[in-house]
Amino acid sequence: MCGFVGFVNFKKDISKDKVILQNMNETLSKRGPDEEGYYLDKSVALAHKRLIVIDPEGGKQPMIEKYSFGTYVIVYNGQIYNTKELKETLLEHDFTINSHSDTEILLKSYIYYGKDVVNHLNGIFAFAVWDTSKNELFLARDHFGVKPLFYTVLNDTLVFGSEIKALFKYPGVEKIVDRQGISELFGIGPAHTPGSTVFKNIYEIRPAHFAVFNTSGLHVKRYWKLHSKEHKDSFGQTCEHLKYLLNDAITRQLVSDMPLCTFLSGGLDSSIITKFASDYYKAQGLPPLDTYSIDYVDNDKNFVKSDFQPNSDTFYVDFISKRLGTNHHKIVIDTPELVDALEDAMIARDMPGMADIDSSLLLFCKYVKKDMTVSLTR
């Protein structure tokens, strides 16, 4: 997954605060078990925990680029799906590309486009760029908020990170659940009002927003909005267009230097993802796609048919796997395991979530991670 943390203060020298930065970064170890990196200067401290997916050597972070008009430092979590197109644009404008890491492409795209870079990105992302040419920090989050990014402002210091728990490692940031937090936790949890969290004075960069922090303070701006338009295509055109969009969205996510799989529950979403991914693997002459499903001890004995679910998931999982010729793996979990993992799942979320659904997903991913690094799922 990767993750990053940092803090910025223009009124005091924070270049000696590496211990604070390390304590914050350590909370993200499970997001990035492979590597860590640090960058400190007078006004900024940045750190990164990395899960290596693309270009082990060329994607190290924080990544630094020096140009005649400034130095730029990025920490980033996500994947940019239009890396190839962005790279072509950069090469046309005399940029040198030294790796096949999307981190390098993202950083140099920021150098080229400035704040408008967010309008040229196709992907899931949260990132921070320290820009010495403007003496400011730029923060951005993807269009639908797939990647998390939280922040608070404390005594002229902007503190931010990929998880809320990281912010609490900064001295003075308190764990306070206020009236709104409690109301949202019990009223709409695990959802929440966009921009807020259950904790007092802890906020998130909202989906499709970016923020700039400089000597005049924090400035947040929306860069994209979903628009509803009249649908004029015929049924046939709609099918072809949908097929194109699904194929484009799914195959763009199959770029990885590490083992990749899909989660296959037998439902419509996971089956569609697996179908296009499997077709891509076959077209590229690759070995069969690995797929994973979860089941529970004695589920075959205790399953009760209903109008909502006339068959168990296993029936559809087996059908899709055989039809597509995937290399399928079934992971079976017992109830005591689910109970034991409830607290870990809540800690991972930083707040109560969906109980056994969260704990089963956590356990499932732990088993999958033994063999795979990347998984596509809905």
Image (cartoon, grey):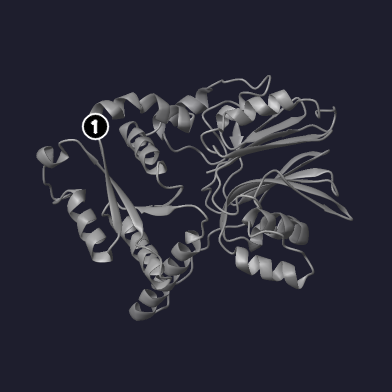
Q: Quadrant of residue 185?
A: top left
In the foreground, 34 or 134: 34
- In the rendered structure, which amino acid carries the disc numbered 1? Asp
- Tell me residue 160's x, y (percent): 65, 35
Q: Secondary structure at mark 1?
A: loop
Q: Quadrant of residue 157?
A: top right
Instruction: Give the residue displayed 27% in from the left and 55% down from the top.
Output: 267
Residue neighbourhood size for the residue with mark 1, other residues' Cα within 10 Å, grouped as few (<14), some (14–19), many (≥20): few
Q: Is residue 322 above or below residue 20?
A: below
Q: Quadrant of residue 4?
A: top right
Q: Is residue 127 above or below residue 13?
A: below
In the foreground, 315 or 269: 315
- Tell me residue 329's x, y (percent): 29, 49
Q: Which residue is mark 1?
A: 334
- On the rendered structure, is 295 left or right of 242? left
Q: Is residue 147 above or below residue 101?
A: above
Q: Is residue 164 visible?
A: yes
- On the rendered structure, is 272 left or right of 373? left
Instruction: Give the residue displayed 47% in from the left and 68% down from the top.
Output: 248
Instruction: Give the residue displayed 43% in from the left and 70% down from the top.
Output: 284
- Tell me residue 359's x, y (percent): 35, 33
